[in-house]
Image (tube, grey):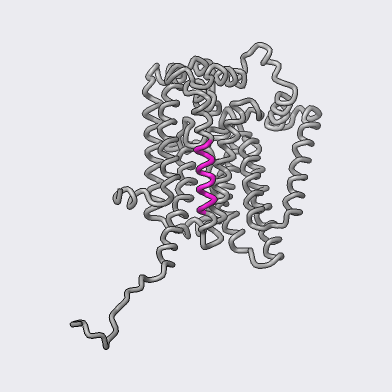
Amino acid sequence: MVLQSKIFRGDRVIWIVLMLLSLLSLLIVYSSTGALAYRQASGNTMYFLVRQVFFLGAGLGLMLVMVNFLSVKIYAILANLLVYVSIGLLIITVVMRFSGIVDGSGRTLDLGFISFQPSELAKISLIFFAAKVLGKYQNTREDLRKAFLIIIAHSAVVCGLIFITNFSTAGLLFATILVMMFVGRVPFRYLFLVVLIGVGIVAAIYFTADKFPDAPTRIHTVKGRIDRFINGDPNSEKGITQADYAKLAIYEGGILGKGPGRSDVSNYMAAAYNDFIFAIIVEEYGLITGIAVMFLYLIFFFRSVVIVRRATRTFPAFLVTGLTMVLVFQAMINIGVSAGVLPVTGQPLPWVSLGGTSLLFTSVAFGCVLSVSYQNQINREIQKPPVQVNMPDEDYDMSK
C-alpha cells in the first residue's frame, strides 16, 4: 500500500475509476472489433486488443509521469505556446483538406511517424489557455471583462477552425469554455449574449444551407443531422442506420445483458467500438452495467469538484474545471447518442472507446486533474500545524 501511494499519487478514487474503465475498455473493445479485424487485420481478432492495451498502458504511464515529475505550473507556462501551435496545426489540416491532399473527413494530420487529430490537442490547449487567463484576471470587473474578451477571441478562432471538420467537437469545446467562464465569475450577461449569437449562427446555417449548394460540406452535414434528429432519418424505415442498431443493442441487452462477447449488433455497426460503444456495453453486460458506467463518470465529476474546492490557487482550480467538464460532457454525449436522445455525433466514450493518440490526449486531461489533486495534498501537509510536544519545566525535578 505504501508503494502504491508513492507511485499512484493524487486522488485514489479517480485512479480506481480509471482502472475500472480500463478493464471495461479491454473487454468491450475485444468484443466489438471482430468484424473490424476481418476488414483491416486479416481476421486477427487479437490485433485491436493488443493495440488498446498498448495505448491504455502508454496513457497510464504518461499520467504517472505527469503526477510524479511535472509541476502544475508548467501547464500555465506552456498554455500560450500550445494554443498557438494548435491554431497553426488546425489551419494546416483545413488547407490540406480543401486542397485535396487528404481524403475523408480531413480531421487527421499525418506527419509520417505519427498521425493525430489536431482538434484533440486544441481541446487541451484552449482549456489550459482559458484557465491561465481566468486565473490572471480576477480582481476587478474590468479584469473579468478583459478575460472574457481574450478568451472568447481565441475560442472563436480555435472552435471555428475545428467546426470546419468536426461540428460536435467544436460545440463541445465551446460549451466547456463557457462553463469555465461562468465558474470564473465572468458576468452572466456576456455569456448569455454569446449563447444567443451561437444559437443564431446555427439557425442561420440550418435555414440557409439549401440556398447555397456550393457551401462547405460541413454546413450541409450540420443541417442534415438536425433534420434527421427532428424529422427522423429516412433510412430508419429500413432499419439500417447506426442509431437503429444502437437502440436494438440496448433493447436486446435488457437488464442483465447477453453475456461477454455475445454481441450480435456489433457485427453490423461501423462504429460499434467507438461512437456507439455504450450500446454494445449494455447489450453484453446489461442496463445495470450501463448505469454503473454512468456512475463512474459522475464519481469522477464529484471527486473533481472536491479537488477544485481544495485548490489554493486559481489556475489549477479553473484547469480542473475545464478538463473535467470536457470529459464528462463527452461521456454524456456518447451515452445520449447511443440511447437515441441526442443527434448522432462522433464523440467516443472517454478512456473506453477504441483509440490511438486520442487516448494519449485523454490521459493528459486525467493526468492534469490528478496532478492538481496531488498538489493539494502537498499543500495540506505543509499547512498542518506543528505537533506540540509537552516538555517538562526546567525547575521540575525529574527524580521525583
User: Closest to the observer: 333 or 235?
Assistant: 333
The outermost residue toward the bottom is: 395
Residue 129, quarter of picture: bottom right
Seen in the image, is 200 located left or right of residue 144? Answer: right
x and y percent of residue 399 in the render? 18, 82
Q: Is residue 51 magenta?
A: no
Count the numbered circles shown.
Answer: 0
Quarter of the figure with the C terminus: bottom left
* Foreground residue among 27 and 57: 27
Q: Position of residue 26 (x, y in %)?
A: 41, 29
Q: Give the percent coordinates (x, y) of residue 263.
A: 48, 17
Whether residue 300 is in magenta: the answer is yes
Q: What's the magenta bit mostly, secondary-structure-wise?
A: helix
Asked if residue 260 is positioned above or below residue 1 in the image, the reply reads above
Q: Is residue 76 left or right of residue 225?
A: left
Instruction: Give the vertical position of 333 relative to 364 (above or below).
Output: above
In the image, residue 231 sits, relative to residue 61, either above or below, namely: above
For the question of whether residue 272 can be seen, the reply is no
Picture residue at 56% right of the left edge, 44% below the top: 89
Query: Residue 363: image x %, image y %?
Result: 45, 43
Residue at the image position 52 percent from the left and 37 percent from the top: 295
Residue found at x 54% / y 47%? 323
Q: Residue at image x 52%, y 29%?
A: 290
For the view shown, which residue lies furthest in the left direction? 399
- Against 281, residue 268 (above or below) is above
Residue 56 seen in the current view: yes
Quarter of the image where one finds residue 337: top right
Range drawn in magenta: 295-307
- Farthest residue toward the front? 400
For the residue pair 303 and 104, the one nearer the viewer reads as 303
